[in-house]
Image: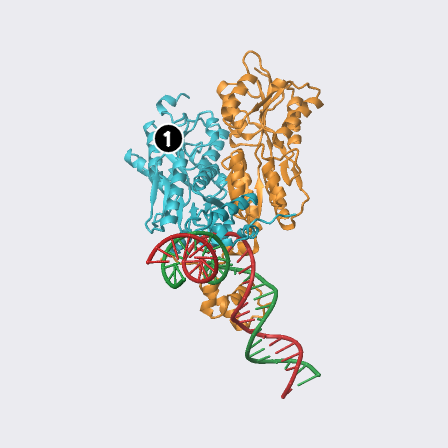
Chain colours: A orange, B cyan, C green, D red
Amino acid sequence: MIKKRVSLKDIAQKVGVSTALVSYVLNGKEKEARVGEAAARKIKKVAAEMNYQPNLIARGLKFGKTHTIGLIVADISNPFFAMLARIIELEAQKRGYTVLFGSSDEQLEKSQNLINTFLNRQVDGLIITPVAGSQSQIEELRNRGIPFVLMDRGFSEMETNVVVTDNHDAMYNAVHLLIRNGYKKPGIIAYDTPLTHMTDRIAGYKDALKDNGIRFNTKWLAKVPYGNYKEHVTTALERLLDAKGRVVDSLVFATNSISVQSLKVIHARGIKVPQDLGVISFDESDVFDFFYSPITYIKQNLQAISENTVQSLMQAIDTRARKCIRVTVPSVIVKGESSSSRREGRNT
Amino acid sequence: MIKKRVSLKDIAQKVGVSTALVSYVLNGKEKEARVGEAAARKIKKVAAEMNYQPNLIARGLKFGKTHTIGLIVADISNPFFAMLARIIELEAQKRGYTVLFGSSDEQLEKSQNLINTFLNRQVDGLIITPVAGSQSQIEELRNRGIPFVLMDRGFSEMETNVVVTDNHDAMYNAVHLLIRNGYKKPGIIAYDTPLTHMTDRIAGYKDALKDNGIRFNTKWLAKVPYGNYKEHVTTALERLLDAKGRVVDSLVFATNSISVQSLKVIHARGIKVPQDLGVISFDESDVFDFFYSPITYIKQNLQAISENTVQSLMQAIDTRARKCIRVTVPSVIVKGESSSSRREGRNT
DNA sequence: TATTTTTGCTTAAACGTATAAGCTTTTCTG
DNA sequence: CAGAAAAGCTTATACGTTTAAGCAAAAATA
């Protein structure tokens, strides 16, 4: 009962010609291949009747091009990556590409497995949010001449194609805003990773302090590991917001996930925002609208990030250039109430 | 500078044997193929040295099996589908499968395009959240004997492999809870679609009313179109919560997205939950924790849905059975404050 | 020693596609 | 009307893999 897919051969047999002729006609090469008009017509007719669909696997084998790209994100169930995936899917589709995806879970081994799997499936290129310590994996891609683009984060020591938000700038502006609004001791909670998205954000934070004449205090910076981050964020917050005297008077959360978890804790402890604590988040979330004091956040331009990433990858695939493209996308601060001026805010 | 992938041929040449021998050895068929011990050793050594990786595209062509599945969801950027995707990815991987994904956007044409693209890429099977009116697309898959499983929703008129939450039961229980807590006029906001996930939920709603001796009022049911749903939800809410006398005293939101949008409106209007309005949501969201009155919601078992879907698909692929598997997954209600008893809650 | 069996390999064909090269047959040119 | 050119097709080969079938040499048997 299972109907076999129709191949060029089936059409050729039905029409009574060779597969070559069919291939020429269906690829619009009738002129170059000097195919007779009558035969061409008949082939087209039969192909349509039999609902011929080319086998892209066979084509991929023939050309060594599959028109498939592999997307490796940290976690597709994270709304941030899901949004990126959505746009990448669209951009890829526009260009005739299909997307294989996988989540690395910030784990070296999973990342390597995904890379291997995708390469064995002959993807034409890879989009990767690299995990910490994966330099050698990426290096190997480069040595093997495989087109790829890093997204969201990169390595400071390595020249690669990479598309990221201007993390330093974004964080600098956020902290600057807090300070301008009267906060004297801004803290930050970030993931403990050497990847550039975090180091740049932390650097932006420190530079903003310096430029505003505030001396950085080591206690203000909390680095939490990605695994079990919820617990670690909670612990870090407890240390920063110790009842016996706050270590900080405001906080910047370096990611979406840290923000949501932190806000849950802040909410549970009944800490008043922004009166008791100024708050700014990196990345947005639906929850911000529901926090009694709307959260100020850094809004990354996901559309631009995704577009540029796909664009760069296409370029890498087409030209196989060795030159690296580094794109930095600007972001904006969406002002809520959570970072409001201390002078006006302090009414408790 | 671009290093060519090493093929069986490369190894064969280096060792000085035929590709056939190499293939036998690397596939562990040394015994059956009576390969000499010395040759086998050498082949393995060289293969390892050259870091041979099989070309899965070529294998796919040979066997007519790509070990790839296509996942078509409504919108991968919707956390609900992103979560499902994450688990499906994992389950597929366990079984040696890789996942192609795409978003249909609830549009017939996009759905058809994705199906075609995936089939041309010779996926072994499809997981689909079908869009309204796509019966013929699905029917064709069945006629062509292509393994597939519908997920999250199905068609009432069609026997197919399908894995869904027990939508009727879930909604029945939710509405029952509201009524038991003293609400007399429970309303519902749902998407306007003939797909079973919605019709079942609405049926569950109506049955709960009936079984509790409440006569259904047409005004209590708001069906909003998926496109521009935010506006439509807002309008529907305005009608239901008209200041001149509430049409309903409580609401069930039939999806995550409807809930979030509704809560934004409710929040903006300063409507008190649950004193002025009881609320239950289908599906969860991080935002529920931040609503001043924690939202009661129906929690679908995403793990079970995904697992069963992949399981069913694997079965369909392996056996090519014509028998349809229909799996219904139970859900639970997570009780917050938003559906609390009217008697106790009414303190305004 | 002649025959059979076993061993260890190679050849060939296949999956579906694309295309250069070749081969008739017809048509044009001088 | 001979020779060249053009038209219209087929054959062959390749992509990388798998596997049945075949073949020669060595080993076992009679």
Q: Is residue A312 left or right of residue A18?
A: right
On the image, the x and y values in percent for residue B134 come to 42, 51
Q: Chain of mark 1?
A: B
Residue C14 sits above or below residue B29 on the image: below
Residue C22 sits above or below residue B315 on the image: below
**Which residue carries the number 1 mark?**
B333
Q: Quadrant of residue B182?
A: top left
Q: Is residue A212 left or right of residue A21?
A: right
On the image, the x and y values in percent for residue A136 come to 60, 36
- Front one among A141 and A335: A141
Secondary structure under tag 1 reads strand
- Kind of residue sitting beneath label 1: Ile
Residue A165 visible in image: yes
On the image, the x and y values in percent for residue A267 come to 50, 22
On the image, the x and y values in percent for residue A208 come to 68, 25
Residue B233 sits above or below residue B11 on the image: above
- Front one among A295 and B181: A295
> Residue lying furthest top in this view?
A244
Mark 1 surroundings within 10 Å by alpha-carbon count, few (fewer than 14), some (14 through 19), many (20 or more): some
Residue A348 sits above or below residue A323 on the image: above
Position of the C terminus of chain B, as image quadrant, is: top left
- Front one among D4 and D22: D22
Residue A85 visible in image: no
For the point 58% across and 35% down, the residue is A134
